[in-house]
Amino acid sequence: MSVQQQDAGAPRASLRLARPGLSASGWVGAAIILVYVVVALTGAAWAPYGATAILTGSPFEGASLQHPFGTDNLGRDVFSRVVLGTRSVLTMTFAATLLAVAVGGLIGIVFGYLRNWVDEIGMRIIDILISIPTLVLALLIISAVGNSLWLVVLTVAFLFAPRVARVARAATLTVVTNDYVAAALARGESTLSICLREILPNITGVMLVEFAIRCAFAIIFIGSLGFLGFGAPPPTPEWGLMINEARANATNSLWPVLAPATAMAVLVIGINLFADGLSRLIDRPGQRSAEAK
């Protein structure tokens, strides 16, 4: 049996590990993400107050045992709102990122496989979309249609998909010339079958890292939309919206601003640490998505 035949018939593992496990920073990031997920799933059972319950204490109370993060201008418990807001933040973040990676990844893989005029035209369109400032485009879309949780998700997914497509196309170009792709083409498999069964499993590692990186961007982006008043509608306990509502009264109490901002920052740091550890774990870390930032 020839070397080429051996290569064509060999298992094509998508995650080739360069190290036996995550780095220490990667485990720290994974632990932070796990804590946030647990809070999102169980917070409603142990949060002291409801997210919209007013006058749970006097307005602008300081931190205490009854109100660990104080209260806002309406007497709402900031700790409860931060805890209960974790679910909406993670839901919007993961939904938008998953949709962007699924759509953008498929487009990038197909373009990278075809490498013809469709690829050329498609990538020029993607370059145009990427050149438009994302925040400006998001504000235009939401102001024209109206803001809601799922509109924010769809808008973020639409803005991130072109960047994911470029990363997926670059990763596809590194594997599309391998023998197993040529063998699948010789067997008469369709373009979609080759993309999903031959190429996708071999760039899964790259796409996982891209998913983690895009999650961190999505948290900041969704928080920015909420801060500008174009995100989740009040009284949703979304962290960016909470910061916007509390900033005018920051001189009276810093807790309503500091608590959601810290929650957002720690989550972004955790995701970045995990993404960095994941990229070091997966072979060929040079295929990371830094070019798409």
Image: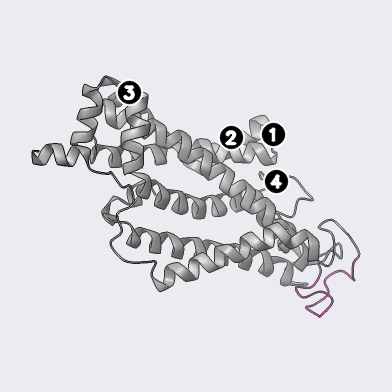
Q: Which mark is residue 191?
A: 3
**Dominant secondary structure (helix, strand or loop) of the stretch shown in magenta:** loop
Give residue 253's position: percent from left, percent from top.
76, 72
Q: Which mark is residue 140?
A: 2
Give residue 173's position: percent from left, percent from top.
24, 37
Earlier residue among tags 2 and 1? 2
Q: What SS does tag 2 mark?
A: helix
Residue depth check, mark 4 versus mark 3: number of the one nearer the observer? 3
Give residue 223's position: percent from left, percent from top.
61, 53
Q: What SS does tag 1 mark?
A: loop
Give residue 19's position: percent from left, percent from top.
30, 65
Q: Amino acid at mark 4?
A: Ala
Please report contact status of discs 4 and 1: CB closer than 8 Å, yes or no: no
* 3 lies left or right of 208: left
When asked about the image quadrant of residue 267, the answer is: bottom right
Q: Foreground: 8 or 162?
A: 8
When asked about the image quadrant of residue 200, the answer is: top left
Earlier residue among tags 3 and 2? 2
Q: CA distance from mark 3 to mark 1?
A: 38 Å
Q: Amino acid at mark 1?
A: Gly
Please report contact status of discs 2 and 1: CB closer than 8 Å, yes or no: no
Earlier residue among tags 4 and 1? 1
Find the magenta span and give its range. 56-71
Q: Which mark is residue 232?
A: 4
* 169 lies left or right of 214: left
